[in-house]
């Protein structure tokens, strides 16, 4: 398998971490890809031109990160599958809900980041302020989402941790840790997992 991915993409980091949790690191080739360069290989695999994109061993292209993660989990042994993404019931929906919350915060954060990179006079302060409010509201909802998760290291946990670590990396002025001591302590501890230690963005 090949994973077309940017090293700074949090969505790609989530996929890479899941692959490690599944014991698939020796079966997954990381192809560092900058989507802004309009690479032919990425555009041929994913008409949206977005990373991450997984090319399976039979040549099938899968995107985006929730689909890739589910595919990777399906390649793992039964016990790992059940730990990372329960097959059914309330536990499954709790995991998927936490992942959706984490990815939603990322979506807002990426939009904010790109808008902030626009030239002076072309940014929308109103949109940026709205996205920031929504990000903070999502962060306030995250502790309850984490409490609802089964076990202590599933796809929901990984998605939330990757999102919080990305905010540290790209959105320090947001100051998300202020007033969220328990959430900050949780991610600092969870970030010691090997799958996250092995996948940090470049300094």
Image (cartoon, helix red, strand yellow):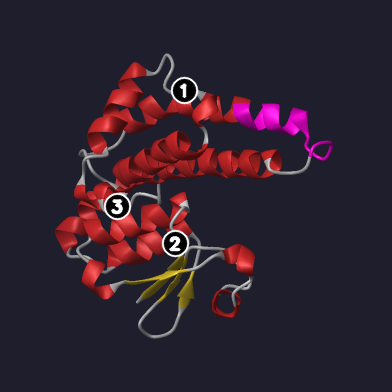
**Which residue bears the numbered disc 2?**
67
**Which residue bears the numbered disc 3?**
85
Outermost residue toward the bottom in this view? 58
Q: Residue at image x 45%, y 80%?
A: 60
Q: Name above or below for residue 41 compared with residue 103.
A: below
In x, y percent, where is residue 113?
Answer: 62, 41
Badge 2 element: helix
Specify which label sits upstream in the sequence, 1 or 2: 2
Q: Residue at image x 38%, y 43%?
A: 162
Most frequent secondary structure within the magenta stretch: helix
Q: Is residue 129 magenta?
A: yes
**Which residue bears the numbered disc 1?**
140
Q: Residue at image x 38%, y 52%?
A: 14
- What residue range appears in magenta? 120-132
Specify which label sits upstream in the sequence, 3 or 1: 3
Q: In the image shown, does 198 or 57 lie closer to the viewer?
A: 198
Instruction: In the rendered structure, find residue 32 and report the number of the disc placed on it.
Output: none
Q: In this rendering, does residue 57 appear at all?
A: yes
Q: How crowded is mark 2: few (under 14 residues within 10 Å), some or many (20 or more)?
A: some
Q: In the image shown, does 94 or 16 lie closer to the viewer?
A: 16
Q: How far apart are marks 3 and 1 (CA)?
A: 24 Å
Q: In the image shown, does 51 or 114 lie closer to the viewer?
A: 114
Specify which label sits upstream in the sequence, 2 or 3: 2
Badge 3 element: loop
């Amino acid at each position: 398998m090949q994973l077309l991915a940017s090293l700074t993409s949090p969505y790609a980091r989530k996929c890479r971490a899941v692959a490690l949790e599944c014991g698939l690191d020796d079966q997954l080739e990381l192809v560092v890809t900058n989507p802004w360069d309009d690479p032919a290989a990425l555009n041929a695999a994913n008409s949206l031109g977005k990373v991450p994109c997984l090319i399976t061993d039979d040549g099938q292209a899968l995107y985006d990160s929730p689909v890739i993660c589910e595919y990777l989990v399906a390649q793992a042994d039964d016990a790992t599958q059940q730990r990372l993404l329960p097959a059914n019931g309330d536990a499954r929906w709790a995991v998927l809900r936490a992942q959706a919350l984490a990815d939603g915060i990322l979506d807002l954060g990426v939009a904010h980041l790109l808008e902030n990179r626009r030239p002076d006079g072309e940014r929308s302060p109103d949109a940026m302020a709205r996205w920031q409010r929504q990000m903070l509201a999502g962060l306030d909802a995250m502790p309850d989402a984490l409490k609802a998760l089964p076990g202590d290291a599933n796809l929901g946990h990984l998605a939330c941790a990757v999102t919080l670590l990305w905010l540290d990396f790209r959105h320090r002025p947001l100051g998300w840790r202020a007033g969220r001591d328990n959430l900050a302590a949780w991610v600092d501890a969870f970030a010691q997992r090997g799958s996250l230690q092995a996948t940090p963005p470049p300094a």
